[in-house]
């Protein structure tokens, strides 16, 4: 859908995470010879690595992971590091209308389980992920959005048992920050922030240590299923497997497998970071928190203070992926950061990068196995919120594969099954552009 540079997995990601990662090489090798395994996983992000870890560690199943770039190249290694909920573009009321109250409650329980899983993986596998903050803040970017935050806080508390509190503008200045787009906030006592690349690399190291084999720079170029086995052909060699998990999310390419063609709507998300801020600069915006923050825009701003006091500021991107549009997007983000946080107008920007999040027509994740080929499993469509949902999906895929008699029931209804295909897939990018225009009008109001 986008300019080829977006998919160029031979190029490093110019992110703050990559630039500040001081660890050496990991020793993982591309697939260089023809081999076989029980379960092959396409995609070395949170979903794929979690599935591989649980299959190898908990069930001693022979598993290999094929990753197109280096381990950490994709969205799992370059996102904003928000462990938050929910992984859906549907409101609470829309979820209840579509799936019912009980199913919606189960969906939110899954989100909380995913947060606990990230924390337990870090503890059990000794992963230093630079955990920050206590819960998540949502900030009203306009006075008219404050009432909606109050209603959301009430629903989260009464329906799902999630502790919340609502703060007025002056109250949030005391514990959070001031800005030109701060008109009160909601605190949700669930989740935290982390370094996504540290978590990804720690998860990869644990997966390899537990017996799974990881193969970076091993893009699947051809997939043939015949005689009860899958042949995944890479540039150098072929991997044969009895079962396959597709875990490529927003970077899934058309033609990988016809079941997933025309199903995903990848959207660009962009991040900039400043140099570390001084005490005086923090005071200009009354900054007091390390808890991650999103605002109420449809085309949201998401931001947080990093451990070295660099400020991270993210938003949705352009609709072409062309480097020139990326440069224009960077300039626009610098201007908008200065407008929202005028006290930091002259603070230098040190890093700019972008990547793909995965939206679908379903507007909730898709986790399960193909109806017409039970040997193919999948987990994708986290609607730009996969830090906690993707590891949970990988774990559950592993459990369903390893213990089919125990897990005979399908996945919870909100996430179970494939999303509908886009009827006019060739114009997905134009539809996204139209949606962005509409959202900008709504956000301005």
Image (spheres, rainbow, N blue to C red):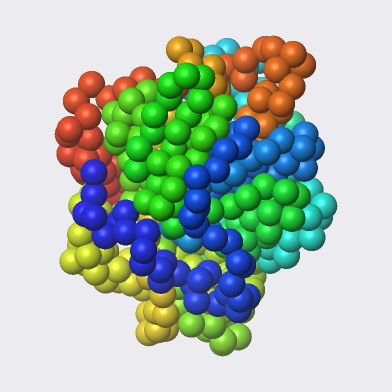
Instruction: Tell me: 205 left or right of 237.
Output: right
Q: Compare residues 174 and 38 and report the one nearer the observer.
A: 38
For image coordinates 74% across by 55% down, the residue present is: 209
194 shown above or below 85: below
Q: Quadrant of residue 434?
A: top left
For image coordinates 53% across by 53% down, the residue present is: 215
274 shown above or below 353: below
For image coordinates 64% across by 70% down, the residue present is: 288
Total number of numbered discs in the rendering: 0
For image coordinates 66% across by 25% down, the residue present is: 401
| Relative image position of residue 64 (x, y in whole percent) | 59, 44
Quarter containing the N terminus: top left
Furthest residue toward front:
34
Quarter containing the C terminus: top left
Q: Compare residues 162 and 197 and report the one nearer the observer.
A: 197
Would residue 198 be seen by someone viewing this image from the given angle?
yes
| Relative image position of residue 12 (x, y in whole percent) | 41, 68
| Relative image position of residue 353 (x, y in whole percent) | 38, 66
Would residue 248 be seen by someone viewing this image from the given angle?
no
105 shown above or below 256: above
Instruction: Tell me: 320 left or right of 298.
Output: left
Furthest residue toward right:
124
Q: Quadrant of residue 111?
A: top right
| Relative image position of residue 201 (x, y in whole percent) | 62, 61
């Amino acid at each position: 859908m986008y300019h080829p540079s977006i998919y160029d997995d031979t190029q490093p990601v110019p992110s703050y995470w990559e630039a500040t990662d001081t660890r050496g090489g990991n020793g993982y090798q591309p697939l260089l010879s023809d081999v076989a395994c029980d379960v092959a996983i396409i995609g070395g992000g949170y979903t794929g690595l979690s599935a591989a870890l649980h299959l190898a560690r908990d069930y001693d199943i022979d598993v290999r992971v094929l990753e197109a770039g280096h381990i950490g190249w994709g969205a799992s290694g370059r996102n904003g590091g928000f462990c938050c909920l929910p992984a859906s573009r549907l409101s609470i009321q829309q979820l209840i209308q579509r799936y019912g109250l009980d199913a919606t409650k189960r969906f939110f329980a899954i989100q909380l389980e995913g947060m606990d899983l990230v924390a337990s993986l870090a503890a059990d596998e000794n992963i230093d992920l630079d955990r920050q903050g206590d819960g998540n803040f949502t900030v009203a970017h306009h006075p008219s959005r404050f009432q909606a935050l109050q209603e959301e806080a009430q629903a989260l508390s009464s329906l799902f048992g999630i502790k919340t509190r609502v703060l007025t503008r002056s109250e949030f200045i005391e514990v959070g920050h001031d800005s030109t787009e701060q008109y009160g906030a909601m605190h949700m006592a669930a989740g935290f922030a982390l370094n996504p690349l540290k978590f990804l690399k720690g998860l990869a190291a644990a997966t390899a240590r537990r017996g799974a084999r990881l193969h970076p720079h091993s893009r699947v170029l051809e997939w043939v299923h015949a005689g009860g086995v899958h042949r995944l052909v890479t540039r150098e060699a072929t991997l044969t497997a009895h079962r396959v998990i597709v875990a490529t999310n927003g970077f899934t390419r058309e033609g990988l497998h016809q079941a997933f063609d025309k199903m995903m709507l990848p959207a660009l998300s962009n991040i900039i970071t400043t140099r570390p801020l001084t005490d005086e600069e923090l005071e200009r915006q009354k900054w007091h928190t390390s808890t991650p923050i999103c605002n109420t825009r449809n085309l949201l701003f998401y931001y947080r203070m990093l451990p070295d006091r660099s400020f991270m500021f993210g938003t949705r991107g352009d609709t072409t992926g062309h480097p020139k549009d990326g440069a224009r997007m960077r300039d626009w983000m610098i201007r908008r950061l200065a407008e929202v946080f005028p006290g930091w107008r002259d603070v230098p920007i040190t890093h700019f990068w972008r990547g793909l999040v995965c939206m679908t027509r379903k507007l909730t994740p898709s986790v399960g196995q193909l109806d017409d080929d039970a040997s193919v499993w999948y987990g994708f469509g986290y609607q730009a919120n996969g830090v906690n949902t993707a590891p949970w999906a990988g774990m559950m895929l592993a459990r369903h594969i390893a213990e089919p008699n125990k897990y005979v029931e399908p996945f919870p209804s909100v996430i179970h099954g494939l999303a509908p295909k886009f009827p006019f897939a060739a114009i997905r990018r134009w539809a996204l552009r139209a949606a962005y225009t509409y959202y900008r009008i709504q956000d301005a109001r």
